[in-house]
Amino acid sequence: RTCTIIVLQCPGQFIPMNRVHKDTFKGASRPFKKIDWQARAKVTRNKVKTTEEQQKSVKRLLKKEQMRRRKIAALGIDYDFPGYAKTAPKASQKITFTDEVDADVEMA
């Protein structure tokens, strides 16, 4: 029976195999795959929002603006700014059409 010993990063310390977890070096021979985080962030950022997501975003913006106005008024500052509430929320410019909608247009 042979005794296998693993050398870890700590110099001068040796740990016998029976004290090392079986999955400690699992996948160590697999090369590291670099993840393109910028590409992932771009896909997430440019994702088309649904109507519900847009409404949720507008609601959140209006709530933040209302809180900002309250804080300014609480400080005794008489300041009125146009803000998000006075501008009409625009629909998303990124509109996608499904094949069903295109098929209905062709039939008409």
Image (cartoon, rainbow, N blue to C red):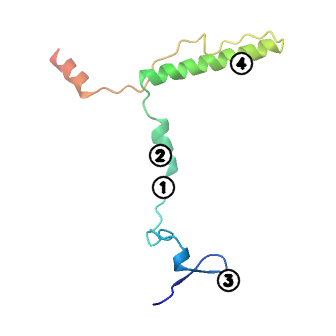
- Horizontal side of 4 relative to 85 (left or right) equals left
Residue located farthest toward the right when viewing the structure as drawn: 76
Q: Alpha carbon of mark 3 to alpha carbon of mark 2: how far? A: 42 Å
SS at circle 4? helix
Percent across and percent down for residue 76 are: 84, 11
Residue located farthest toward the bottom when viewing the structure as drawn: 1
Q: Amino acid at mark 4?
A: Arg
SS at circle 3? loop
* Residue closest to the eye, 9 or 17: 17
Marks 4 and 1 close (CB-CB < 8 Å): no
Q: Alpha carbon of mark 4 to alpha carbon of mark 2: how far? A: 33 Å
Q: Alpha carbon of mark 1 to alpha carbon of mark 3: how far? A: 35 Å
Residue wearing tag 3: 12
Residue wearing tag 2: 40
* Residue closest to the eye, 99 or 31: 31
SS at circle 2? helix
Residue wearing tag 4: 68
Which residue: 60% across, 20% down?
61
Instruction: Report the mark closest to the observer, 3 or 2.
Output: 3
Which residue: 49% across, 19% down?
55
